[in-house]
Image (cartoon, rainbow, N blue to C red):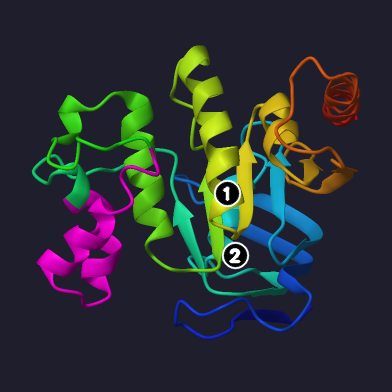
Amino acid sequence: MSTQVKHRGQAPSPEPATRDAVLARALTRTYRDARGAAVQALADVSLRVGRGEVLAVVGPSGCGKTTLLELICGLQTPDGGTITSAPAVLMPQRDLLLPWLSAAENAALALRVAGHSRAEARARASALFADLGLEGFEGARPEELSGGMRQRVAFLRTLLAGKPVLCLDEPFGALDAITRGEMQEWLSLTLTREARTVVLVTHDVEEAIMLADRVAVLSPRPGRVIEELEVNLPRPRARTDGEVSSLRERALRALGGAARA
């Protein structure tokens, strides 16, 4: 099977003229564990993400969700199949804020890497703090921020990378339930203002349905797409909505069936 990895361009430009921002066909990926044994993370994964679409990927631990994001971002190369993506940036599970930098300086890191001066990068990042509910904390160190605030700074850093595709890996997984719910609402509103293509990995089925336009359910390792759910619901969405509950049950049934197979 042929292998192809292609990222269209490198500049933070608008999304490509094609209909899909991300297109994977028959994707496979195998790696070696600490003992040198082969472990297949993904098997025959085919999926597409339309321009401006939010796709959530759910599945059990170890099913290759993070591997999929790294393939989209060009951080790994598939063993088989093809993947084509517009320029993409990864927001990892941990915020990875640098403790010696202020919140604004951490958010501005992507701009500094792109060659902007320290003053310009900090000014551009600081100008967005109010939109993200962080006004007044531009000069705070990471240890002075709550978990939710740290995640907002990390998201702003990801946003300022200027890539049309955002790959978010369990962005709220380490937060408590109340903060997580608040952050889900905040992200939904932010993506309404800052239209990007998003691939969101989460273990939380309800989070996927609340945030995504479509949900891809992966099987246990090696990960395969076993079901795709269209979420044709207006935003903002309520957890008590009957259709949200129905979609959640469908996703959970798919996950339960795959685990028993």
Element at label 2:
helix
State yes or no: discs 2 and 1 in contact (Cβ < 8 Å). no
Note whether 115 is above or below 151 in the view shown. below
Identify the residue shown where x is 88% and y is 21%.
249
The percent coordinates of residue 56 (x first, y second) are 70, 44
* Residue range highlighted in magenta: 105-132
- Whether residue 256 is visible: yes
Question: Is the C terminus in the top left, top right, bottom left or bottom right quadrant?
Answer: top right
- Callout 1, which amino acid? Leu
Identify the residue shown where x is 12% and y is 66%.
118
- Name the side, left or right, on which 132 lies relative to 213: left
Element at label 1:
helix
Judging by the rendered image, the residue that carries numbered circle 1 is 191
Instruction: State the mark number for residue 72.
Output: 2
Note whether 155 is above or below 244 in the view shown. below
- Whether residue 37 is visible: no
Nearer mark to the viewer, of 2 and 1: 1
Identify the residue shown where x is 47% and y is 56%.
90
- Name the side, left or right, on which 101 lies relative to 85: left
Identify the residue shown where x is 44% and y is 45%.
34
- Name the side, left or right, on which 76 lies relative to 118: right
Sequence order check, earlier mark of 2 and 1: 2
Name the quadrant containing residue 102: top left
Assess disc 1: are there few (<14), some (14-19) or many (≥20) residues with their C-alpha within 10 Å of its C-alpha. Answer: some
The percent coordinates of residue 82 (x first, y second) are 73, 75
